[in-house]
């Protein structure tokens, strides 16, 4: 038996980030993944743009932008080789959207400036309304940044099929640890976590070889990266899908390429590689970070939960089991801050921010879920 303080299952950006902060706190950590480090799942497919969210100041926008501020500093200070601060232009989708930008302006908590259509044209962006430029935003090299984050942390390829807990230890094959963290993206077949409502959204993106001189990245209805070493990334499609890889079709990038051609000059774009993967989102689009409720025990001890009764005590948890998930379409924005929050909870017993604590979804699920008998 090899002994660790914590085992993280899943080596996407979520698993890598929490492993990093656990190691920083002195824990002996093992990361396992059935496929490799960011070679499957959402993290392999991601264009990995790291930019703030615009809008009218919703609580999700506020959290996203706190996470953005943290992520860009984290990547820049520690992994600058794999994070290019290209700047990201947010372009209105149409006339109506352009009007909304004046309302959005006061909720831009990250530094930005307006950029007019003349200047947009000079930098290679076609026919666009006045836009926001977030100069500190950028793009990660997803697989390489994940590998760099794991530098110095033990990693092994392992397909986890079952988990056992005995004598206050989690056992996975020949590995054991006090703490177990599931960072498995849209899949979980080990525990009843239906209350978290994790759902997958399938997506594709493409890398194109081009000589186009594009120094800045952009989001409109799709995203196009700056030209980095002769490659421009174009992403992404969104298809609600329970099973991976069913709906790629023969040309998943066709629709993206048409949109991209309206935004920049794609005349010399040569497709280099296609990436597909599943994003995992929660019911309310906020991340899921924290411990896991023992659902069957709660339903047994409090049979009236399904009728809306509130238990007098905190929900009972599965011992030393944690999740970091539900990062949606912004895994590279959320993961560093969420990883830090979870590491502080596990090691220092610091309370999880209630906005991301999965407990928030439990009682409503008990009351409303059609899967439960009432
Ligand atoms: C097309 C596309 C474009 C995107 N673009 C962006 C973007 O520009 N910016 C951004 O921030 N986000 C983007 N995202 C979202 C981002 O990719 C995800 O939010 C993020 O990758 C989620 O990371 P994760 O670590 O939670 O999950 P994943 O990356 O899915 O990792 C889960 C890992 O768990 C492993 N695993 C699962 N089950 C087991 C098991 N039983 N045993 C062992 N290993 C297991 C899998 O192999 C996988 O490696 C995009 C996503 C897609 C699909």
Image (cartoon, rainbow, N blue to C red):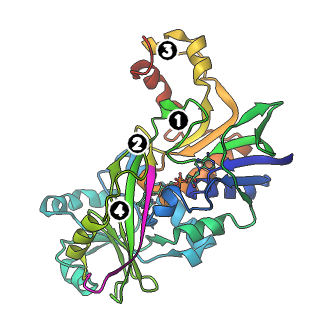
Distance from label 4 to label 1 (Cα)?
A: 27 Å
Q: Is residue 277 magenta?
A: yes
Give the mark nearest the N terminus, 1 or 3: 3
Residue corresponding to mark 1: 358
**Which quarter of the rendered picture does the N terminus lie within?**
top right
Q: Is residue 101 magenta?
A: no
- For discs 1 and 2, the disc positioned in front in the rendered view: 2
Callout 3: SS: helix
Near-viewer residue (123 or 114) = 123
Farthest left residue? 95
Indicate if the residue with disc 2 has its beta carbon within 8 Å of ligand 1: no
Give the mark nearest the N terminus, 4 or 1: 4
Distance from label 2 to label 4 (Cα)?
A: 18 Å
Residue corresponding to mark 4: 236
Residue corresponding to mark 2: 242
Residue corresponding to mark 3: 305
- The magenta segment is 266-279
């Amino acid at each position: 038996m090899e002994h660790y303080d914590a085992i993280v299952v899943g080596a996407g950006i979520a698993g890598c980030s929490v492993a990093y902060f656990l190691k920083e706190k002195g824990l002996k950590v093992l990361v396992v993944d059935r496929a490799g480090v960011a070679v499957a799942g959402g993290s392999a497919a991601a264009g990995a743009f790291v930019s703030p969210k615009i809008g009218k100041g919703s609580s999700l926008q506020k959290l996203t932008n706190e996470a953005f501020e943290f992520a860009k500093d984290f990547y820049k200070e520690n992994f600058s080789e794999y994070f290019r601060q290209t700047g990201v232009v947010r372009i209105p989708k149409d006339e109506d959207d352009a009007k909304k930008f004046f309302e959005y302006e006061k909720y831009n908590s990250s530094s930005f400036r307006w950029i007019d259509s003349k200047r947009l044209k000079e930098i290679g962006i076609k026919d666009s309304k006045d836009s926001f430029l977030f100069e500190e935003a950028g793009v990660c090299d997803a697989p390489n940044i994940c590998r760099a984050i794991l530098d110095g942390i033990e990693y092994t390829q392992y397909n986890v099929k079952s988990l056992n807990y005995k004598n206050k230890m989690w056992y996975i094959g020949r590995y054991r640890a006090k703490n177990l963290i599931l960072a498995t993206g849209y899949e979980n077949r080990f525990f009843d976590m239906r209350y978290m409502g994790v759902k997958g959204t399938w997506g594709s993106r493409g890398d194109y070889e081009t000589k186009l001189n594009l120094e800045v990245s952009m989001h409109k209805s799709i995203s196009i990266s700056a030209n980095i070493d002769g490659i421009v990334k174009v992403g992404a499609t969104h298809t609600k899908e329970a099973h991976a890889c069913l709906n790629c079709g023969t040309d998943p990038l066709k629709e993206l390429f048409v949109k991209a051609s309206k935004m920049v000059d794609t005349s010399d774009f040569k497709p280099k590689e296609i990436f597909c993967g599943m994003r995992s989102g929660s019911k309310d689009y906020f991340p899921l970070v924290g411990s896991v409720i023992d659902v069957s025990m709660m339903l047994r001890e409090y049979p009236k939960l399904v009728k809306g009764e509130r238990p007098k005590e905190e929900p009972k948890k599965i011992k030393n089991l944690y999740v970091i998930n539900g990062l949606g379409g912004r895994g590279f924005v959320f993961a560093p801050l969420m990883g830090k929050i979870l590491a502080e909870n596990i090691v220092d017993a610091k309370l999880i921010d209630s906005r991301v604590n999965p407990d928030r979804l439990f009682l409503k699920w008990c009351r409303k879920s059609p899967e439960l008998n009432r």
